[in-house]
Amino acid sequence: MAAAASIAFAASAGAQDKNPMVGGAPMLSNKNIVENAVNSKDHTTLVAAVKAAGLVDTLSGKGPFTVFAPTNAAFAKLPAGTVETLVKPENKATLTKILTCHVVAANAMSSAISKMIADDKGTHPVKTVGGCVLQARKKGNMITLTDEKGGVATVTIADVRQSNGVIHVIDSVLLPSS
């Protein structure tokens, strides 16, 4: 319900300066993806992973980027010990691959994604900077993303505008096929 409301709200006039709160923090459209993410109490695992992967400078850059941002609860769904293993220096390449499969080199608002899904008769392939191809679909008013392993994430908060793109909060971690 919250995602549908935020999608409708973001589409309304003047929404650019009225981002939804994420993780109890205001998301300011004049700050970049990293500057906003560090303030969300729901994204501490994602921020730690981005730091461990060495992606802070990239995601602070000009963009535009669309980031499908898994919450701490999404990371907690992974098998026990997965996150702790991934953030070790020797696993940086694997972590980077997983994280970049959450990033698209575009500023894709939910209305544009929904239109692409409709234009493609229900499923739109989304190519990520990590080389993954996600399948975007609609489930009621919600956008879902299916990863290359068949896992499905739902956008729970859409259209969180950033100075260098947009964040869509998701409820599961998206995984590459390898």
Image: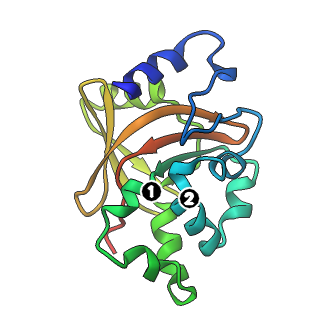
Residue 153 is left or right of residue 89, and the answer is left
**Residue drawn at point x = 52 percent, y = 78 percent:** 87
Between 111 and 80, the residue placed more toward the observer is: 80
Between 20 and 94, the residue placed more toward the observer is: 20
**Residue drawn at point x = 33 percent, y = 24 percent:** 1
What amino acid type should be assigned to the residue bearing mark 2?
A: Thr
User: Hey, which residue is sitting farthest bottom in the picture?
Assistant: 90
Residue 61 is left or right of residue 13, and the answer is right
Label 1–label 2 contact, CB within 8 A: yes
Q: Specify few, some or many for label 1: CA neighbours under 10 Å numbering under 14, 14-19, or 20 or more.
A: some
Determine which residue is flagged by label 1: 72
**Residue drawn at point x = 74 percent, y = 62 percent:** 57
Considering only order in the chain, which callout, 2 or 1, is on the residue closer to the N terminus?
A: 2
From the top left corner, tell me how far across and down residue 10 is, in percent.
54, 20
From the top left corner, tell me how far across and down residue 12 is, in percent.
55, 11
Determine which residue is flagged by label 2: 44
From the top left corner, tell me how far across and down residue 118 is, in percent.
31, 25
